[in-house]
Image (cartoon, rainbow, N blue to C red):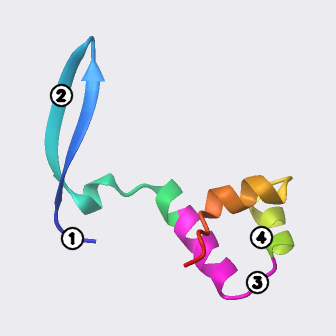
């Protein structure tokens, strides 16, 4: 994940923009979601991953891992 991106936010009604390297926006949540998605694509049953990630419904779990048919 290389390259630059513009990150916009609003504080006190004022729009702020900053240019960051893509890696600067990575978080532990992004890593966790990517790992779970890749494990799911590796044919681990959703039920097993739902226990690990503490999701109760399969619908919410599938939204979390963002499987879109690719």
Q: Secondary structure at mark 2?
A: strand
Q: Which mark is residue 16?
A: 2
Q: Secondary structure at mark 3?
A: loop
Residue at the image position 61 percent from the left and 72 percent from the top: 37
Residue at the image position 71 percent from the left and 62 percent from the top: 62
Q: Is residue 36 left or right of residue 2?
A: right
Q: Position of residue 8 (x, y in %)?
A: 24, 36
- Mark 3 lies on residue: 44
Q: Secondary structure at mark 1?
A: loop
Q: Is 62 colored magenta in this rendering?
A: no
Residue at the image position 73 percent from the left and 59 percent from the top: 61
Residue reaching furthest front? 69
Q: Which residues are magenta?
A: 32-45
Q: Position of residue 16 (x, y in %)?
A: 18, 28
Q: Which mark is residue 49?
A: 4
59 or 21: nearer the viewer: 59
Q: Is residue 68 left or right of residue 61?
A: left
Is residue 54 something one can see in this rendering? Answer: no
Query: Upstream in the sequence, badge 1 or badge 3?
Result: 1
Q: Which mark is residue 2?
A: 1
Q: CA distance from mark 2 to mark 4?
A: 38 Å
**CB of mark 2 within 8 Å of CB of mark 4?**
no
Q: CA distance from mark 2 to mark 1?
A: 22 Å
In this view, 50 is above or below 55: below
Instruction: Answer few, some or many: residues within 10 Å of disc 2's Cα (few below 14, many 20 plus, some between 14 and 19).
Output: few
**CB of mark 3 within 8 Å of CB of mark 4?**
yes
Q: CA distance from mark 1 to mark 3?
A: 30 Å
The N terminus is located in which quarter? bottom left
């Amino acid at each position: 994940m290389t390259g630059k991106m513009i990150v916009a936010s609003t504080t006190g009604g004022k729009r702020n923009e900053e240019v960051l390297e893509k890696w600067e926006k990575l978080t532990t949540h992004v890593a966790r979601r990517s790992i779970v998605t890749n494990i799911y694509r590796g044919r681990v049953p959703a039920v097993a991953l739902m226990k690990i990630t503490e999701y109760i419904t399969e619908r919410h779990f599938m939204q979390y891992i963002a499987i879109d048919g690719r």
